[in-house]
Image: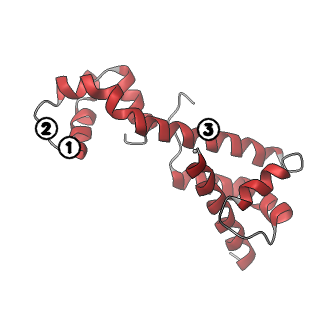
Amino acid sequence: MGRTMKVVNVAVVGMLLQFAGMTAVQAQTLSYGEAMTKLAQDCGSDVKKHCDGINLGSGRIAECLQKNSARISPTCSGSLTTVFTSVEKREQAQGAYEKVCRGDMARRCKGVKGDGYILACLNKAHSRVGKECNQTIIDAGWR
């Protein structure tokens, strides 16, 4: 992999992290690593073409792609939407987990101490855990 491609990959990773920090499919959500890989593959040439020379950080690559949204490839545009929707859904699920799963925690994991152990308990008892709690755990990327 050449130096230019490495710079493009780093730029796309930086862009993703900026978007995820600003905000972030009945299917499972993407991990940050999967999201970065998808953006590097689908948007790398657009970053190189439209945002070459822009410094990383402070959301500059993301701003550049937004400013050039009419000129970026349909593949990149679609991936941006998919990735950021998925990352946002993952972050929302992680934030909602305790509230959504509170009843299942009390019923299935009474006496279990520690967040990690409670999550392991819910995962072990998944067939007896409510649908909404199970989906939240999946969307959070914890199963």
Q: In percent of the image, x 50 and y 48: which residue is there?
A: 31
Q: In percent of the image, x 58 and y 44: which residue is there?
A: 23
Q: In percent of the image, x 89 and y 45: which residue is there?
A: 70
Query: In 3D space, how far apart are the residues under numbered discs 1 and 3 (Cα atoms)?
Result: 29 Å
Label 3 neighbourhood size at 10 Å, few (<14), some (14-19), many (20+)? some
Q: Are marks 1 and 3 in contact (CB under 8 Å)?
A: no
User: Quick one: 68 or 48, which is closer to the camera?
Assistant: 68
Query: In 3D space, how far apart are the residues under numbered discs 1 and 2 (Cα atoms)?
Result: 7 Å
User: Quick one: 53 or 9, which is closer to the camera?
Assistant: 53
**Disc on res. 85:** 3
Query: In 3D space, how far apart are the residues under numbered discs 3 and 2 (Cα atoms)?
Result: 33 Å
Q: Are marks 3 and 2 in contact (CB under 8 Å)?
A: no
Q: In percent of the image, x 53 and y 36: which residue is there?
A: 89
Q: Are marks 1 and 2 in contact (CB under 8 Å)?
A: yes
Q: How many marks?
A: 3
Label 1 neighbourhood size at 10 Å, few (<14), some (14-19), many (20+)? few
Residue beneath disc 2: 112
Quarter assignment of residue 113? top left
Q: Is residue 86 left or right of residue 124?
A: right
Where does residue 138 sit, x and y in percent of width and height? Answer: 41, 35
The quarter in which the C terminus is drawn is top left
